[in-house]
Image: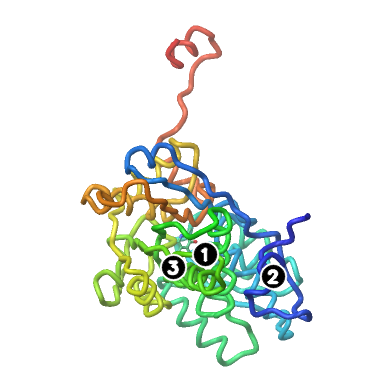
Amino acid sequence: MLYKGLIEKYREYLPVNAKTPVVTLNEGNTPLIFSEDLSHELGLKVYLKFEGLNPTGSFKDRGMTMAISKAKEKGATTVMCASTGNTSASAAAYAAKCGMKCAVLIPDGNIALGKLAQAMIHNAKVIAIRGNFDDALNLVKTITEKYPIELVNSINPFRIEGQKTAAFEICDSFGDAPEFHAIPVGNAGNITAYWKGYKEYHSAGKSKTLPKMLGFQAAGSAPIVLGHVVDKPETIATAIRIGNPASWKPALAARDESAGLIDAVTDDEILSAYKRLASGGVFTEPASAASVAGILQLHKKGFFDHVKGSRIVCTLTGHGLKDPNIAIKNVGQPVTLNADIKEILKEVGL
Ligand SMILES: *Cc1c(COP(=O)(O)O)cnc(C)c1O
């Protein structure tokens, strides 16, 4: 049967009805890629849920199909969000799909080139403000409270509803939940959504077990780990450069109810995981690699010593092509040679 996106697939678990206009780009249904490399090193069965293969290149599309469909149902004509990049790319695309206007506030100067290109090409009104993500979100909250504009950040509950379907897909693939689920944490909407999805599937009898949720923040932007707001969050992983997560409390609940943890990984650990994933054929953006950096760190501490053979899923939140500059910066430019076979063979190592 033709795949029609996650709302049609999981309609019975979502707050939609026969009258909801479904705005979709056929998001979801992303692959779970088995990693031989990581499985071998960790003694676990490591799977990568590659969310970079959604229509706009990140998991944000899962929440956006719901948020835009519900906004449309309500009769809204304009949506707005604050964004480190991927939310704006997604909002712009889904708004364009159904003829809505979209305005996005981004932190000045800290947005990956690919994400900016996406928002612009889909005709969103992109406004860079002199401030960080948290400042942008505060502005959007105030504006959407006062004016007839729909807020489509993850504090919009429909976003979480759409995003929880990733957990359903994982359970459908395995016939059960994995033992562990590792995930990057920024605004903390996604860890909240996965845990909600796992719990709902469990209650519905679709899975017998629940995973332990392992969340990872970047060390320079780790408010949940530190237990306080970070005023000037810093990390090369711009998608998780957030000092005051909107879903802070539900993230703590996901951690505690699942008997999991939320920890910090350094930028060096993130970049090393980023390059390692790419060396294994999977190109993610740096923020996405935080999940893998996190499990490598836990492995070094002996965290998995007594659970060998367990299944663990790492969410890879976005595609590497979003941020080509950081890739080139980390691996360098191609060599230039004369158009000469001998020179080429020497360079290739033959
Ligand atoms: C949004 C985003 C995150 C963070 O997700 P939260 O729900 O804010 O915790 C991580 N990685 C990428 C690529 C993102 O776009």
Residue 96 lies left or right of residue 43; in this view the side is: right
Amino acid beneath label 2: Ala
Classify the position of the N terminus by image quarter: bottom right
| Element under disc 3 | helix
* Circle 3 or circle 1, nearest the eye: 1
Compute the Cα span from label 3 to label 1: 18 Å
Badge 1 density bin: few <14, some 14–19, many ≥20, Cα 10 Å = many
* Circle 3 or circle 2, nearest the eye: 3
Q: Does the Cβ of the disc 1 residue fall within 8 Å of ligand 1?
A: no
Which is more toward the observer, 194 or 105? 194
Residue 339 picture quarter: top right
Q: Position of residue 171 (x, y in %)?
A: 54, 59
Amino acid beneath label 1: Ser
Residue under label 3: 191
Residue under label 1: 207
Does label 2 or label 1 sit earlier along the sequence? 2
Q: Residue at x 37, y 77 (%)?
A: 253
Q: Does the Cβ of the disc 2 residue fall within 8 Å of ligand 1?
A: no
Residue under label 2: 95
Q: Does the Cβ of the disc 3 residue fall within 8 Å of ligand 1?
A: yes
